[in-house]
Amino acid sequence: MEHAPDDPHPDAPTQPEPYLASPELARAVNLALHLGRPLLLEGEAGCGKTRLAYAVAYELGLPLYRWDVRSTSKAQDGLYNYDALRRLHDAQMQRFLGEREQAASPSNDPGDPRNYVQLGPLGRAFALCESPAVVLIDEIDKADIDFPNDLLTVLDEPWAFTIQESGEQVQAEPACHPLVVITSNKEKGNLPAPFLRRCIYHFIKFPEAQLKRIVESHFARRALAMPAATDLAIRRFLALRQGERLHKKPGTSEFLDWLEALAHFTSPVTKLTTDGPLPYPELLIKLRADWYTVVEQR
């Protein structure tokens, strides 16, 4: 996925994404585009769930709007935010300065609530008239249990929502319904059944068979020379994932960082060998129990 159109949207990613999607994942994306359903992605941390949205947006030249979900997030946050405090401030300033000075800045007119509405990632995508957008809702399971079901009220016909403070309705054009990519790490268990029924689901497996192609694409994009010991590094890395009882297996992103360290910082003392200690284990091991198993016991 590295072929942007000639005239991408101004909000489209500008950097190519060296993403190698499996045929099954590409099919899931196409189904989501055609059916207008959210695409729910699960998989190990670092397997490429988040980067898929960037790759699709870059390849299609579509705007990308990212929404990082937090424990305090509400569904409305993705639609719009209303700044009531700033409106109150401007109203007080208007009374203090007088209407003449205030009229010089119509955007601060407290009489018009539209001046205090800021669209969120979903709201911006709905308001687009010229093209669809890709909306990334990252780590949806961090939010409250009601959050996913609240999204269903807008991610379906008529693809519209109302800004309560101004009475405006924002409705997506039929040809511009966004592609909504949702990632989940199952931090709080399974998502609600009604939400799951609405989504197209895909589990991204760790790309063992594609690992060398991913490495080649990553190093070519950054104009870096691949380490001579790439094949050995792949074998050692896969053996670590498959042979050790790790609480957290390292993912693709950790492997790429590790390989880059091998390419640029390896000395005779830290040279990668067939059965010796793993150089730079801090790039692969992220839990104390795993560190004890892999590093200290050897």
Image (cartoon, grey):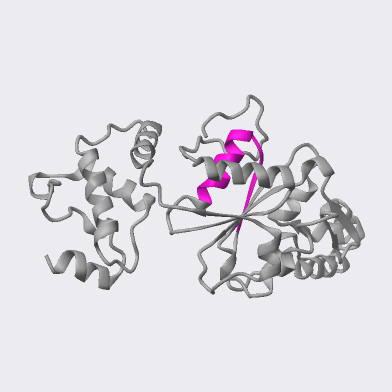
Q: Is residue 60 magenta?
A: yes
Viewed as shown, does residue 140 lie left or right of 98?
A: left
Q: Quadrant of residue 123?
A: bottom right
Q: Quadrant of the C terminus?
A: bottom left
* Residue 98 position in % (x across, y down): 89, 63
Q: Nearer the viewer, residue 9 or 226?
A: 226
Q: Is residue 220 magenta?
A: no
Q: Picture quarter containing residue 110? A: bottom right
Residue 41 higher or lower than 145, as above or below: above
Is residue 74 at least partly visible in the picture? no
**Which quadrant of the view contains residue 142?**
bottom right
Query: Residue drawn 57% across and 71% down?
Result: 190
Q: Residue at x 26, y 68 (%)?
A: 290
Q: Is residue 134 left or right of residue 119?
A: left
Pick the front one: 232 or 169:
232
Rendering coords of residue 174 (x, y %): 83, 44
Side (left or right) of 22 relative to 130: left
Question: What range is drawn magenta here?
Answer: 50-67
Residue 44 in the image, given as x and y percentages of width and height: 44, 59
